[in-house]
Image: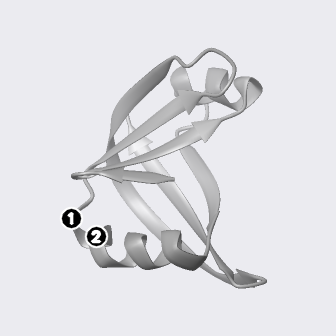
């Protein structure tokens, strides 16, 4: 995860990226922890865009972020979030 202004950036495996790019899967489930979770919580309310990059090709897309849902479940020291976007 990386924060760039009002954009949250993630990388995806090629199989997921294809579905995300075509909006067949307009969301991503992520575990955030440590310094990355702290950074996210500081800027969460100002995030308006999401960028997803294919780890295989480096191709990326950016979409309007429509929802950030915290899943009330913890993985070790991490917290689960679902990020949803519109095309």
**Residue 24 image position (x, y, % from top left):** 60, 28
Q: Badge 2, how many Cα within 10 Å: few under 14, some, many 20+?
A: some
Looking at the image, residue 19 lies above or below residue 8: above
The Cα atoms of the two marked residues, 1 and 2, are separated by 5 Å
Residue underneath mark 1: 46
- Residue under the point 39% across and 72% down: 39
* In the foreground, 48 or 26: 48
Residue 74 coordinates in the image, percent (x, y): 72, 84
Residue shown at 72% from the left, 23% from the top? 14
Image side of residue 63 versus residue 80, left or right? left
Occupied quadrant, residue 71: bottom right
Which residue occupies the foreground of this view, 46 or 83? 46
Task: Name the residue at 65% across, 36% down.
Answer: 12
Label 2 near label 1: C-beta < 8 Å? yes
Q: Is there any visible trace of residue 87 in the rendered image?
A: no
Neighbour tally class for label 1: few under 14, some 14-19, many 20 plus, Cα within 10 Å: few
According to the picture, the residue beneath numbered tag 2 turns out to be 43
User: Which mark, residue 12?
Assistant: none
Quick one: SS at disc 1?
helix
Task: Specify whether 4 is left or right of 37.
Answer: left
Label 2 SS = helix
Residue 36: x and y, percent?
50, 68
């Amino acid at each position: 995860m990386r924060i760039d202004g009002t954009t949250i950036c993630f990388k995806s495996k090629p199989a997921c990226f294809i579905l995300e790019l075509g909006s067949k899967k307009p969301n991503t489930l992520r575990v955030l922890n440590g310094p990355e979770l702290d950074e996210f919580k500081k800027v969460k309310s100002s995030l308006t865009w999401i960028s997803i990059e294919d780890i295989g090709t480096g191709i990326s897309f950016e979409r309007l972020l429509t929802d950030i849902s915290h899943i009330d479940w913890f993985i070790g020291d991490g917290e689960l979030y679902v990020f949803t976007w519109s095309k």
